[in-house]
Amino acid sequence: MANLAACMEAEGCNAIAGIIITHLHHDHYGGVDNLQEVYGPGIPIYKAAVDYSNHWVTLEALKKKKLLHVFLEAPTYP
């Protein structure tokens, strides 16, 4: 959080428009609560839909906490 705050300050950024969860490893989504506490509870969270049943628990936990506001469709590749 300190590194993010310093980076945002250096760039003149004072808000977060959205949080993107790149994949469902705890080190990539574990700080969502902190981000929303510091920068605002209304920040939308984006994550591509996944087909892996073991990851569903993570998505459901985020939805239950009302942290996951938007589901994006997974990209399709030719």
Image (cartoon, rainbow, N blue to C red):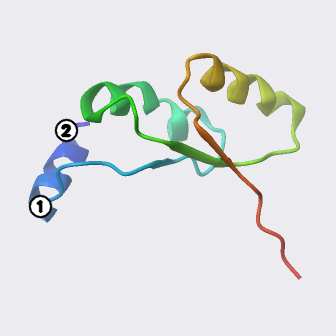
Front-most of residues 52 and 44? 44
> Is residue 51 found left or right of 11 in the rendered image?
right
Q: Quadrant of residue 13?
A: bottom left
Residue 12, numbered label: 1
Residue 76, numbered label: none
Q: Up-down: is 7 above or below 11?
A: above
Q: Quadrant of the N terminus?
A: top left
* Residue 55 image position (x, y, % from top left): 78, 32
| Amino acid identity at mark 1 | Gly
| Amino acid identity at mark 2 | Ala
Name which of mark 1 and mark 2 comes first in the sequence: 2
* Residue 65 image position (x, y, % from top left): 56, 17
Element at badge 2? helix
* Residue 48 image position (x, y, % from top left): 70, 51
Q: How many marks?
A: 2
Front-most of residues 34 and 14? 14
Q: Which residue is drawn at the image coordinates 41% and 39% (left, top)?
A: 43
Q: Which residue is mark 2?
A: 2
* Residue 27 image position (x, y, % from top left): 51, 36
Element at badge 1? loop
